[in-house]
Amino acid sequence: MRWECHLPVMTALLFGAMAAPAQAATIQITSTDLVFAPSEVSAKVGDTIEWINTDVFVHTATARNGDFDVNMPPKKTVTSVLQKAGTVEYYCRFHPNMKAVLTIAP
Amino acid sequence: MFIRLSAAIAALSLLGGPALAQGAKPTDPQIAHIAYTAGVIDINAAKQAITKASNKDVKSFAQDMVRDHEAVNKQALDLVKKLKVTPEDNDTSKTLSKQATEKLAELDKLKGAEYDKAYVANEVAYHKAVNGALETQLIPSASNAELKSLLQTGLKIFQGHQQHAEQVAAKLK
């Protein structure tokens, strides 16, 4: 088999590998004693956020721009997948003094 | 209405006054009683609001108050049990309860939007007063570290409620 025959296959493999999305990460954000921690998190579209609520209170992670609204039952962990890029300020609807920022890269 | 609000605030400011005579700091059993009573008062006001409120934001705010204050009070009960402390009734708790009963009766006479506004306005003022008492009297006076830390969590919860109540109040205008 000649070299030329291999080229398209190799190209496909190479570009295929490049086009495959980078491994999506799982990032933990806790709410403890009415504080989101860490208060600033950088992530990418497709990443999963594990929202860990250690409080005995229900909290929400509600994006000010409406991009997400996650309900966090007491003493539970819930997950959500980031769908949209942007710098998103979010807060708890029940305790608006809880505020944090998620920076989501495309 | 403002006379009533200031009455509630005056009750809480008794903490620094004659209710606890000779400028005595409230003791941990008294602090536990005051904090628990303050929670019960807000739960009772919220239960009234759940049946009387007509605005859906006001109703769901009231449901949030019941849920959160019951959770805080459950923690408080668990803590006093663990510490083997018996909450001790005192003049501040008594005055708070008396004012709250009067306030409930007053709110009970109102209807519709008028009730909703009065309930939410009272929630803003009441949480503000409780937060002031927590910050300046109850937290600094608490000697047990776990009680102090529960009061600090309580303060953050109540500050959250105050902001939430302010937002609901702003939407009613």
Image: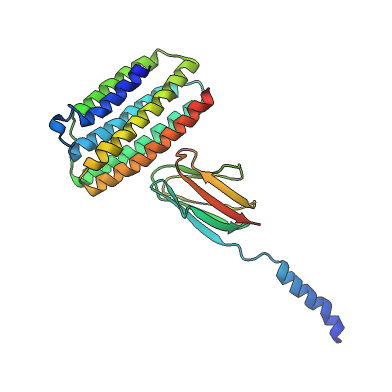
Q: Quadrant of the N terminus of chain A?
A: bottom right
Q: Is residue B43 visible?
A: no
Q: Residue furthest top?
A: B109
Horizontal side of A80 relative to B42 (left or right) equals right
Horizontal side of A36 relative to A22 (left or right) equals left
Q: Position of residue B46 (x, y in %)?
A: 39, 27
Q: Quadrant of the C terminus of chain A?
A: bottom right
Q: Residue at x 70, y 66 (%)?
A: A20
Horizontal side of B6 relative to B81 (left or right) equals right
Number of numbered tags placed on the structure image: 0
Residues B86 and A64: in front is A64
Q: Quadrant of residue B47?
A: top left
Q: Residue at x 40, y 12 (%)?
A: B109
Q: Position of residue A16 (x, y in %)?
A: 74, 70
Q: Residue at x 60, y 62 (%)?
A: A24
Please say if A26 is above or below B36.
below
Q: Position of residue A21 (x, y in %)?
A: 67, 64
Please say if A14 is above or below B35.
below
Please say if B35 is above or below A33.
above
Q: Quadrant of residue A44?
A: bottom right
Residues A88 and A93: in front is A88
Please say if B67 is above or below B125.
below
Q: Is residue B15 visible?
A: yes
Q: Position of residue B42 (x, y in %)?
A: 35, 29
